[in-house]
Amino acid sequence: MTEKKEEEINNKKERKEEQRNTEKETNSKRERKEEQRNTEEQTISSESPSYTGSRFPTDGPDFSNEISAPYEVPQFPIEQIEKKLAIQRQITVKNKMITKITLKNVPNDVGSESPSYTGSRFPTDGPDFSNEISAPYEVPQFPIEQIEKKLAIQRQITVKVLEDKRSHYEPSLVGAVDEQDHLGMEEHDFVPHFQRVSISGEDTSGVPLEDLEKASRLLITALKLRQTYMDMSHQSFCNTTARFICPESAQHNEIKHDDKQSIEEHGIHPPSRGNPWEAPDIPDNTYVFKAHQGVYHVYVDEEHVQKNEPINYPYPNLETFVTDMNTMCQMIADGPLKSFCYRRLSYLSSKFQLHVLLNELRELASQKAVPHRDFYNIRKVDTHIHAASCMNQKHLLRFIKKTLKNHADEVVTVTDGKQMTLKEVFQSMNLTTYDLTVDMLDVHADRNTFHRFDKFNAKYNPIGESRLREVFLKTDNYLNGKYFARIINEVSSDLEESKYQNAELRLSIYGKNREEWDKLAKWAIESNVYSDNVRWLIQIPRLYDIFKLNKLMKNFQEIMDNIFLPLLEVTARPTSHPELHKFLQYIIGFDSVDDESKPENPLFERDVPTPDNWTDDENPPYAYYQYYMYANIAVLNHFRAERGLNTFVLRPHCGEAGPIQHLICGYMLSENISHGLLLRKVPVLQYLYYLAQVGIAMSPLSNNSLFLNYHRNPLPEYLARGLVVSLSTDDPLQFHFTKEPLMEEYSIAAQVWKLSSCDMCELARNSVLMSGFPHKMKQYWLGPNYTKEGVAGNDITRTNVPDIRVAFRYETLLDELSNIFKAYHKSG
């Protein structure tokens, strides 16, 4: 047995030995094959720099080093490799010759300054060409000397482009707009070369001809309707669209534009006013005002009142408005028109994506070429912000603590006939300055306010106490709004310190009595709440039902009287309301505010009661409020323009929630709107807002807490399609955390939606264009030429928006208008 075991052990040892020898032979064969393969690869790689299978860098000075996949085999036969090398040598020689000839025709390469986009798997054609964008894993292509040389060349190109701008430019109007030569385009409306996306062929709309003709008729009817309402109320309408609607009148009534000037010739900061409360000296006169079916008529004197001969200030009567409203409602429900508008909006989105893919680097390069200007030092306007919540919660907390420390014994309110100092108010709540925290203030919106407007309104009360809101956040209180004025001045001071941020603050006029206007003006002037960075809108809360319930008024006409009669009187006789006459210089328009989601009947008929007969306890619908505000503003604007005074615009909260008919009112009656979220559900209206370039002030952080989650917000979609949108804060007290809430809004939008620098600068430029700041101020901020259309109205040294982006927006709008009007004229 022992011998057998020994034999088995010996046999096993022999077999193992044989296996080892076999493995050694196999390994030696593999090594020999590997050596042969490496020798072949080195030979081929030394012959062909364009061959992409090498795992090691090539030696040619004109070609980039490449990192390739681990296992690669030759791609081309040797003849093709040799032929390709010959062609590449010719290309390299030609490119070097082109570079020497004064760097002309090079703008195509300007966009690629960044040596970090360097992971291409295929070799570039020499140091004169831009690096390619590659897969996620990127490594440097060039040695540092080549990178430096390339950047130096690109800097020379940038300088050359700036010097020879005119010689390298081409007309910005192409393709579809050739037939619109009669519209009188600017001769010097030029833009740098960039990659354009255009659709050729007879039918470029993608819908049957019959549907296109019908859609164009309806859309042009809607555009003419808005133009009529805007003209009647001294509000602005898009010049480009106006020229398409009526080219003859556009030629006769040319707007006088100023020429472009450098910052040295025409600065970027407007000169500050000496005494801001100086007002134009206008003589008093004897005009008389009478309300007729809810709208004020202006009469020269009492004699004309007796004869019933008012001055003919045009405005649409209620019957006309109801008819036009019903026309628009039928239009947005039209099936073929909805399909057409949806297709055009989808096309606009796709076209913008292609534009970004093709031109993003060029846009970035043109921004880099501008000295000093960047996103931080271009003008931005917060186009929708309420004065009572314009500070952040920490600011309000610090202000309350500071006031309680320094003015504890100041009488601030009267409760049950007893005067109370600030200290006593806090003692009644068992609070000291040490106890106060941001959490205790409880003014920040949280998840409990979503779709709960009542809870959101309660957040305006610090510590849940309406007394503190009255003391600190009201203009009309025992102290005549002294504390509120102080905190407004602190916010204004922060804006002035930031230099480039501006705000349009909303102040409330409720329409409860006729003294409200005088009290507000007195508060503003006595507290000196003026700032070059601030303008005011008057918000009218839709609270008739509450006033009626508390028996503060008998009918709706009393609200109209309390709002508009003092304004008409001060326009006719400035000495009757001297402080209001001064304050009205800085009021730019009216806002209409409240919870839009309240149930209501969105449509009303011609036989609806007029304001003097509206005695119901029920609140009138949204459209009723908007029509009577619009009609009275139209009459007031005609009267003020005739007297040489500033006019007002209507800029309501619209489309935040509730019925889509609100957006129809906004389209017909308003110069621009706030929110506009529901446009995402109505393609016809969204397309009309685009064609008419109606401004939309959007507040994604506000919507996120109240009505729509941030990631569902349509702002990036609107921006891509070319709607005029701007970013605004709405209520920093409830929604923001930092000292600069507008910058917080921009930064979150940029992070979440991956907005480029160009996108953010475009949003900022839109905010200035749609704001109510004076024309002369905008000339400093955007350039004296900003009223011109297209590239001729852009000054990148002030706006930091590349001419390429402005040209793309302008040409796209012209294409869309051209398609519609071409079909309209063909159909007769």
Image (spheres, helix red, strand yellow):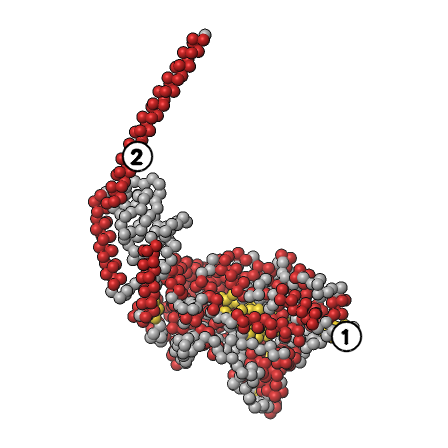
Left or right position of 609 against 107: right
Task: Identify the residue at horizontal 38%, vertical 70% (top origin).
Answer: 791
Circle 2: residue type: Glu
Side of 141 where 408 appears, left or right: right
Q: Is 450 placed above or below 638 here?
A: above
Residue at position x 33%, y 75% from top? Answer: 187
Q: How many marks?
A: 2
User: Which residue is at 54% across, 58% downward?
Assistant: 710
Mark 2: few/some/many CA within 10 Å (<14, 14-19, 20+): few
> Of the numbered discs in the image, which one, if any, rests on residue 419?
1
Q: Quadrant of the N terminus?
A: top left
Is residue 305 visible in the rendered image? The answer is: no
Name above or below for residue 562 compared with residue 210.
below
Q: Is residue 454 left or right of residue 155?
A: right
Q: Cα distance, mark 1 to mark 2?
A: 99 Å
Residue 198 occupies quadrant: bottom left
Q: Nearer the viewer, residue 347 or 101?
A: 101
Q: Is residue 78 above or below residue 627?
A: above
Q: Position of residue 87 (x, y in %)?
A: 22, 52
Mark closest to the chain's N terminus, 1 or 2: 2
Q: Position of residue 114 (x, y in %)?
A: 38, 58
- Give amino acid for label 1: Gln
Nearer the viewer's eye, disc 1 or disc 2?
Answer: 2
Q: Pinpoint residue 493: horizontal percent, then vertical percent.
A: 57, 73
Q: Is residue 581 visible?
A: yes
**Crowd band around label 1 with a 10 angstrom C-alpha radius: few (<14), some (14–19), many (20+):** few
Residue picked out by circle 2? 34
